[in-house]
Amino acid sequence: MQLVLAGADLGFWDWNIVTGRVDRNERWATMLGYTHKELKHSTNQWADFVHQEDREKAWQSINDVLEGRSKSHSLEYRMLTKEGGYRWVHDQANVMQRHSNGKPLRMSGTHSDITNRKLAEEKIKLAASVFSHAGEGIIITDDKATIIDINDAFTNITGFSREEAIGKNPRILQSGRQTPEFYADMWQALQNEGYWSGEVWNRRKNGEVYAVMQTISAVRDVHGIATHYVSLGNDITLMKEHQNQLEHIAHFDILTNLPNRVLLADRLSQAMLQCSRHKQSLAVVFLDLDGFKHVNDTHGHDIGDELLIALSVRMKEALRENDSLARIGGDEFVAVLADLTTVEDCEPVLERLLLAASEPVIFDNIVLNISASIGVTLYPQDNVGADLLMRHADQAMYVAKESGKNRYHLFDTAQDDAVKVQRESLEAIRSALDNHQFVLHYQPKVNMRKGIVTGVEALIRWQHPKRGLLNPIEFLPVIENNPMSIEMGEWVIDTALTQISQWQKLGLNFPVSISVNIAALQLQQPDFTDRLMILLAAHPDVEAHYLELEVLETSALEDVYNVSTIMNACMALGVNFALDDFGTGYSSLTYLRRLPANLIKIDQSFVRDMLHDSDDLAIVEGVIALAKSFKRDVIAEGVETIEHGTALLQLGCELAQGYGIARPMPASEIPTWISDWKPDVNWQN
C-alpha cells in the first residue's frame, strides 16, 4: 500500500474517530513543507492547516459522510504550508470501519497536490476573460486561416456574429483598398517572422469601410510549426479621421481651402526637382490683390472673406492642370506654374489670372471691383533656392504695383544697375567700419505700470561724413546676406557690453540691460555661440544676463531647429533672447513653443495703428494672449502716444518702447533721462 501511495505521490491520513488520533504518512507532511515528526496526531492541527475560507465546507463534507448523508468525502481546498503560503489539495476519504450499529469508527483518505493544475486553470480563466472582454476584436484561425473563434469585440466592430464568422476566411473583411501585394507581404512576414503589424482598411458587414490597427501572431507547436494564428484589431477610424483633419488644417488655408505656405513650400521644392530632371522651367507667381483693404473697410470682413473665396475659385480655374495655387495670408496668393519650356509659355496663364482678379464680383447686390498686381520669377533662369524665388517674385510684384497695378512684372535676374549700386554700397560700408563711423544710440524700454526703466535697445547709426547721421534702413539691407553683417553684428555686441560696463561704473542706481538686434546670417553661423562666448569673456565685469539678443521672427522661422539649438546654447551662457517684430512672419504655435525666447516684441506696425484699425488691435490682443499662454514676457514697440500706452495697459501689456516714451539717444544722455523720466499718470491708475 505504501508503495502505491508513494508512486502516486499521494499523502495518506488515517483517523481513529473514537480516540481522535490522526496518523499521516511522510508525503502528507512534505506536501506542506513539514517533516513527519513535526505533525501532531490531532484533528485540530488539520483544521488549523485548512484555509479559513475553506474550513467550514471541509468539515461539512466530512460530517456528511460520518452522518450518512454522503458515501464519500471528496473536496478541493487550500492548506497552509510551513513557509506561510498555501497549496491546493484534493482530499478524498471513506469510512473504513463501522460499529455493528453502523456508527463510523475509522476514516481514511488521501491528499494529492493540485496547485499546478489550479494555477493552470486560473490562467485559462484569465485568458478566457481577456478574450471575452478585450476591447480589440480578436480572431483565432487554424493553420489554413479558417476562423475558429472570435470575441464579442470583433462582432461589435465588424457586425459579423460568431455563426457568420466561424468557418470563414478573414477575407470576408477585405475592403478592396489594399492590393494583392499588400496581403502577400503580410503573409510572407507571418511565414518568416511569425508576426505582422500595421494599418488595414476593412469592410464591416453593412458595407462600411473602417480603419483598423491590426496585429497578427503565429502560434507554433514544439516543433516550430504554425498551428494557429491570432489577430488583434483595434478600430482606429475616428483617430484616422481626426489625423486627416489635422493634416488638412496644417496644409490648407481654412477660408479658401487652398494650400497654405507649408504645402506650397513642399510643392515648390518638388517642382524644382522635376525641373532639374526634365530640363524644364517653372514660374513662381506672387499675386497681391489691389484694393482689397478698401473692400474690408467699406463692406466688412464677411464680404471680404466671400470675395477671397470667389477669387480663389476663379484663379484656380485660370491655371493649368499641373499648376498649384496657394494662399499665404491676407490677400496674397502664390502660384507655381510647372512644365514651362519658354518664358512665353506662362504669359497666357498670367493674363487669365489678371482677368480672374479684375472681373466684378457681386454679393448681396454689392458690386466689388478690384484687381491684382503680379510678380513673376523663373527657375532655373533665376537660379536660387525656393525662399529667394519667393522673395524675388514678391519684389517683382511690388514693381508691378508701383507701375500702376493690374499687371504683371518679370523679375530681372541680371539687374545690372542694381548689382552696381550694391557693390558701391558694400564698399562704402566697408570703409565706414574700418574708419569707425558707426555709433550706437539707445532707446529706453519701460514698464509703464510700475514706472521703471527696464533696459534699452541698442540701435546702430552711421555717422556719414557727407550725409550726416543715417538710420539703419539706409545700410543694413545692403549687407543682409553679406559676411560684413556678421562683423558689424559682433561690433554692436562688443560696443553694447562696453557701454554696460561704463554705465555701471558711473553708478546708475539700478542695472540697465541692453538688447541687440541679431541678423539672421550672423545667428545661423556654426560658431555663433563660440564667438559670443569670446565677446562675453572680454568683458568679465558684465554679467551675461544684462545682454539680450533680439531675433527677427522671420529669420528664426527660416531654420527653426538650428536657431532654437543656438538660442539654447546662448541661454546656457546667461544671455536672454527676444523674438522681434512678432506677427510679421508666418508664426505658428509650434514655432513659438520651440523658440526659447524670454520676450516677445509686438511689431510697431501693429501698435502704431491699433487705435483705429480693428485688425491691428486684434493682432496685438492675440500676441499678448499668446505670450501669456506660453509664459513669455511681451513688449510693444511703436508706442507713440499716451493713448497707445493706456490701450496696451488695458490689454495687459506693461512693457513698452517708442517715440511716445523716448527717441533713441546717444549713450551719454541715458543716465540723465533715466533719472528724470516719469510715467504718465494715466498709466499708473
Image (spheres, grey):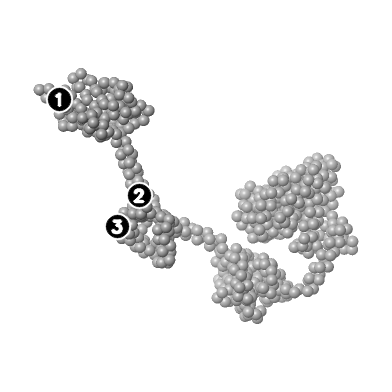
Q: Residues within 10 Å of mark 1 (few under 14, many from 20)?
A: some
Q: Residues within 10 Å of mark 3 (few under 14, many from 20)?
A: some
Q: Which mark is residue 478?
A: none
Three-letter code for the amino acid on which mark 1 is drawn = Gln
- Helix, strand, or loop for circle 2? loop
Above or below 369: residue 592 = above
Q: Residue at x 37, y 52 (%)?
A: 224
- Rendering coords of residue 147 (x, y %): 32, 57
Q: Residue at x 60, y 63 (%)?
A: 262
Q: Residue at x 17, y 27 (%)?
A: 95
Which quadrant would residue 139 be assigned to in this image? bottom left
**Which mark lies nearer to you, 1 or 2?**
2
Q: Report which residue position mark 2 lands on.
A: 222
Q: Which mark is residue 97?
A: 1
Q: CA distance from mark 3 to mark 2?
A: 26 Å
Three-letter code for the amino acid on which mark 2 is drawn = Val
Q: CA distance from mark 1 to mark 2?
A: 50 Å
Residue 598 vs residue 270, the one in the foreground: 270
Three-letter code for the amino acid on which mark 3 is drawn = Ile
- Helix, strand, or loop for circle 1? strand
- Rendering coords of residue 278 (x, y %): 60, 75
Q: Which mark is residue 166?
A: 3
Using the rendered image of the protein, determine whether residue 603 is visible from the camera's viewpoint.
no
| C-beta proximity under 8 Å, tags 1 and 3 | no
